[in-house]
Amino acid sequence: MDKKWTPTSAADGVEQALKILEGKWKLVILFHLFGGKLLRFSELERAIPAITQKMLIQQLRQMEIDGVVRRIVHHQVPPKVEYGLTDWGQALCPSLDALLKWAALREGQGENDA
Amino acid sequence: MDKKWTPTSAADGVEQALKILEGKWKLVILFHLFGGKLLRFSELERAIPAITQKMLIQQLRQMEIDGVVRRIVHHQVPPKVEYGLTDWGQALCPSLDALLKWAALREGQGENDA
DNA sequence: CGGCATCCCCCGTGATACTG
DNA sequence: CAGTATCACGGGGGATGCCG
């Protein structure tokens, strides 16, 4: 399976996966769910102050559809809904972790902030 | 250095890095530069048929500014310009690789195509 | 608390044509 | 070949208000 994949053919499959992560907030949300944490809607809102409810729920829903995020509803009042990663979502952790390390590397590199 | 980073503080730094990868084509381009390959402008164009010149040069420029991509100009006619990853860009390879593996995992998972 | 509906605006993106 | 310039558009994303 890990034969000499041409970048072209590999990229083809990758682009599909990439679309799942597309969007301004997907990765940010995932990072907060990183490590199998379960977070309530409001917790995510507070964790990502810059995001709006609409965007949060929208991206959450899309990722749920894409099978990356799972939604756990607790039928009670007041309502309580938690979000976490699916197994496949967990499989993203190595990538997220690598990304985390990469970001940390930024110190002292050619950072060039906007 | 790898003390107990709170996700909040880590995410703060990560979000900066994430913005660098934002955009419809950044990752796709990076995947084609993956492995230290040097590609000419026209080669990238052909490798990513769906992209327009404008988008290609735009994303390339931004990534160059962000220190992820390097631009090698060969002063000659006809003009020849090659693009590759910087050291910091190379540092993204583990992430890209992990992403690649994750994408491959998609077979037989809960794929749910749009 | 968690979520949906609506309106609206901006900017990311695309198409086309031109230049060094 | 490797860009730049310009115009146009669509929808992603923001603000606000209401509902179960």
Image (spheres, coloured by chain):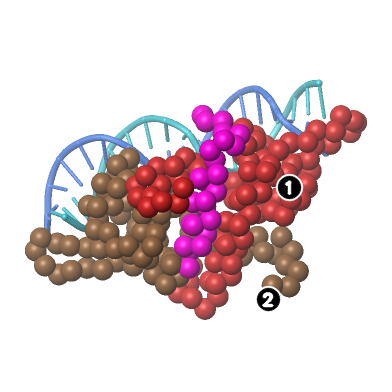
Chain colours: A brown, B red, C cyan, D blue
Task: Specify the farthest residue to the left.
Answer: A77
Task: Note whether C18 is above or below A66 in the view shown.
Answer: above
Q: Which mark is residue A1?
A: 2
Q: Position of residue D18 (x, y in %)?
A: 12, 47
Instruction: Give the quadrant of the N terminus of chain A.
Output: bottom right
Q: Position of residue B63 (x, y in %)?
A: 61, 38
The one nearer the camera, A1 or A55, is A1
Viewer can see residue B50: no
Judged left or right of residue B56, residue B78 is: right
Q: Nearer the viewer, mark 2 or mark 1?
A: 2
- Return the chain for callout 2: A
Task: Note whether B5 is above or below B57 in the view shown.
Answer: below
Q: Position of residue B42 (x, y in %)?
A: 78, 44
Measured Cα–Cα span from mark 2 to mark 1: 26 Å
Crowd band around label 1 with a 10 angstrom C-alpha radius: few (<14), some (14–19), many (20+): some
Q: What residue appears at the point 56 percent right and 31 percent down from the top-left corner?
A: A112
Q: Position of residue B3 (x, y in %)?
A: 41, 51
> The residue under label 2 is which amino acid type?
Met
Q: Quadrant of residue A77?
A: bottom left
Judged left or right of residue A78, residue B80 is: right
- Residue at label 1? B44
In magenta, the rendered stretch is: A91-114
Viewer can see residue B93: yes
